[in-house]
């Protein structure tokens, strides 16, 4: 497991980006939480690589570069041609090439299965993600504090779950027909619930650290500012919002759906992985929060 993703990291020249988190163990743990079944090895590989690339993009938009450089990166990703990297800064060249090579890998695999229709959905989801990253950069650059609702309209998308679930569907073979991707694009109730769970759980444990550097306000600051509440009362309100989101997700999982239930399970499993990583702190940024869970999952034998 480790060698495959370490090689991907090295071959993509991602170590050149010294500011970025190197988290292939955590990325694999997350993808394994979505795809623990033996038949979904390809899904685990695709999703782990995608998480690593999203992580690089997240760190880049958060702590490195300028809005102008980011816009050139976005434009190059939209063109989706390797020649587009010629106009980029050195660090964004590395990122853009890694993404485009990965898309080519996916395209080749799904072409063999007659599922080429799935690739544009992933590309669209990624472009949507980086456009929303750019919106957050503008807030930070302008010193703008949005309302909680305005913040959530963007930040639920930068929680990255749209891209992760789309790539997860690609990894599920012919079970994920084109109807599954069309359904996902309509933003079903289960996905909206997952986005809320992901964004609030992440912000609750990471907002303090993020505000130590130039960064757009998190949901916590936006809610406190808008409603004139203390942090304690804000987090109390967030408990209720999270409880409602979990209820919505569970309700969707319990009722009959138009598509295979196995697809919906990826959304539920992503929420479970979110809880695993953020229940005590930001376990993706600070792996010490999840090291015991990782050890129990992959190293310690199950007692019988």
Image (cartoon, rainbow, N blue to C red):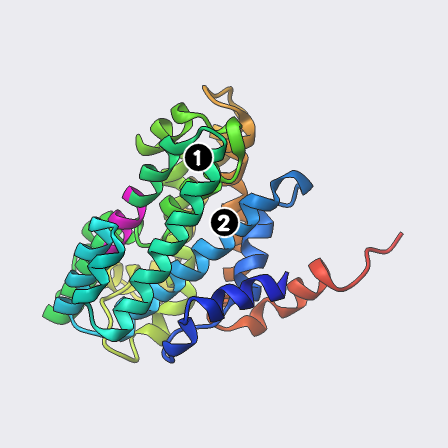
Does 155 appear above or below 170?
A: below
Residue in the picture at 25% in, 52% down: 81
- Residue 23, horizontal then vertical, whole percent: 50, 68
| Disc 1: which residue | 111
Which of the 4 image quadrants contains residue 122?
top left
Foreground mark, 1 or 2?
1
Towards the viewer: 239 or 15: 15
Which residue bears the numbered disc 2? 46
Q: Say which element carries label 1.
A: helix
Pinpoint residue 133: horizontal percent, then vertical percent: 24, 59
Q: Pointer 1: residues within 10 angstroms few (<14), some, or many (20+)?
A: few
Q: Residue at x 23, y 63 (%)?
A: 85
Region of the chain picked out in magenta, as a range: 124-130
- Sort mark 2 into few (<14), some (14-19) or many (20+) by Cα contacts within 10 Å: many
| Residue projecting furthest to the right | 304
Q: Nearer the viewer, residue 134 or 11?
A: 11
Element under disc 2: helix
């Amino acid at each position: 497991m480790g060698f495959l993703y370490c090689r991907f990291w090295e071959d993509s020249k991602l170590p050149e980006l010294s500011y970025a988190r190197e988290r292939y163990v955590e990325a694999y743990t997350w993808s394994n939480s979505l795809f623990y079944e033996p038949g979904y090895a390809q899904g685990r590989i695709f999703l782990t690589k995608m998480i690593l690339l999203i992580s690089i993009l997240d760190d880049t938009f958060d702590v490195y570069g300028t809005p102008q450089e980011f816009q050139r990166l976005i434009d190059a990703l939209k063109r989706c041609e390797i020649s587009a990297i010629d106009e980029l800064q050195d660090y964004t060249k590395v990122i853009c090439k890694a993404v485009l090579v990965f898309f080519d890998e996916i395209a080749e695999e799904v072409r063999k299965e007659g599922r080429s229709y799935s690739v544009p959905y992933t590309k669209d989801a990624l472009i949507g993600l980086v456009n929303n990253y750019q919106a957050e950069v503008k807030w930070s650059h302008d010193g703008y504090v949005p309302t909680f609702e305005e913040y959530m309209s963007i930040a639920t998308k930068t929680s990255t779950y749209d891209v992760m679930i789309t790539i997860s569907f690609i990894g599920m073979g012919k079970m994920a027909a084109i109807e599954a991707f069309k359904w996902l694009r309509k933003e079903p109730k289960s996905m909206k619930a997952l986005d809320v769970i992901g964004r609030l759980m992440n912000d609750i444990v990471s907002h303090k650290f993020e505000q130590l550097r130039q960064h757009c306000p998190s949901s916590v600051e936006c809610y406190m500012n808008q409603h004139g509440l203390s942090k304690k009362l804000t987090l109390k309100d967030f408990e209720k919002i999270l409880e409602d989101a979990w209820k919505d997700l569970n309700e969707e999982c319990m009722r009959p759906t138009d598509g295979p239930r196995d697809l919906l399970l990826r959304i539920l499993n992503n929420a479970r992985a979110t809880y695993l990583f953020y229940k005590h702190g930001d376990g993706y940024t600070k792996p010490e929060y999840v090291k015991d869970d990782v050890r129990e999952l992959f190293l310690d034998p199950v007692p019988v």
